[in-house]
Image (cartoon, rainbow, N blue to C red):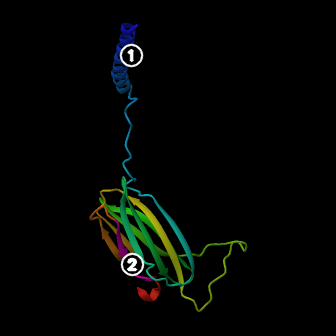
């Protein structure tokens, strides 16, 4: 009986080894063990971003103007918080784009907000004595090999951030950013 047990254990162990080697070779040929393409990060030509904005009378909050960047896996997260003072009847549009290989721009533009709204969707106009402003919160995903990102308002550079390391970095923006006609 002891001999039978030793033979069964030896056969079992040999079967495990042969099965593992055969499975690895067979799986490798079929691509079953290939993890597939790795995440290469965001599209460098059109980086994804999300934007949240609100408007009304200017409410200056301490430390509200900033840009933050940090490495997160296969990309860099770049976030922005800004309050933009602008003329009545205007709003702020935003775009994140590549301007040259490795160089990106967060482009803030004041544009006319003359849109036709139904009475049900019309918002109450701010009082005449208030400075109109839009609060922006933006998050973008840039490739890990980006060199710099510029923040511009109506074509005027506010800040240029260079990619120096993977540690989180915080940069101050003017608070508020002035986009009124008298500022140009």
In the rendered image, the residue lying farthest to the bottom is 129
Q: In which quarter of the image is the N terminus?
A: top left
- The tag earlier along the polypeptide, 2 or 1, is 1
* Vertical relation: 111 (above or below) 72: below
Along the horizontal axis of the image, is 117 left or right of 79? right
Foreground residue among 42 and 170: 170
Q: Is residue 169 magenta?
A: yes
Q: Residue at 64% across / 83% down in the picture?
A: 125
What is the x, y in percent for residue 49? 46, 61
What is the x, y in percent for residue 80? 43, 70
What is the x, y in percent for residue 102? 30, 60
Q: What element carries label 1?
A: helix
Q: Quadrant of the C terminus?
A: bottom left
Q: Quadrant of residue 163?
A: bottom left
Along the horizontal axis of the image, is 123 left or right of 94? right
| Other-residue count near label 2 (Cα within 10 Å), few / some / many at <14 / 14–19 / ≥20 | some
Range of magenta residues: 168-177
User: Which residue corresponds to mark 2?
Assistant: 173
| Other-residue count near label 1 (Cα within 10 Å), few / some / many at <14 / 14–19 / ≥20 | few
Q: Which mark is residue 12?
A: 1
In the rendered image, the residue lying farthest to the front is 2
Q: Which of marks 2 and 1 is in front?
A: 1
Q: Residue at 34% across / 20% down in the picture?
A: 17
Q: Is mark 2 on a helix, strand or loop?
A: loop
In the rendered image, the residue lying farthest to the right is 120
* Vertical relation: 26 (above or below) 122: above
What is the x, y in percent for residue 116? 65, 72
């Amino acid at each position: 009986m002891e001999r039978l047990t030793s033979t069964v254990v030896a056969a079992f162990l040999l079967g495990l080894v042969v099965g593992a080697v055969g499975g690895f070779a067979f799986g490798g040929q079929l691509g079953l063990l290939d993890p597939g393409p790795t995440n290469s990060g965001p599209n460098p030509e059109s980086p994804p971003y999300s934007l949240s904005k609100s408007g009304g009378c200017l409410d200056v909050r301490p430390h509200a103007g900033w840009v933050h960047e940090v490495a997160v896996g296969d990309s860099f997260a770049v976030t922005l918080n800004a309050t933009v003072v602008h003329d009545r009847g205007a709003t702020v549009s935003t775009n994140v784009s590549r301007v040259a290989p490795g160089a990106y721009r967060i482009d803030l533009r004041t544009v006319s907000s003359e849109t036709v709204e139904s009475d049900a969707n019309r918002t109450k106009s701010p009082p005449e004595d208030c400075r109109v402003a839009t609060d922006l919160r933006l998050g973008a995903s840039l490739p890990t090999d980006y060199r710099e990102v510029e923040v511009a308002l109506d074509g005027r550079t506010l800040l240029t951030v260079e990619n120096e390391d993977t540690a989180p970095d915080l940069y101050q923006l003017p608070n508020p950013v002035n986009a009124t006609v008298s500022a140009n």
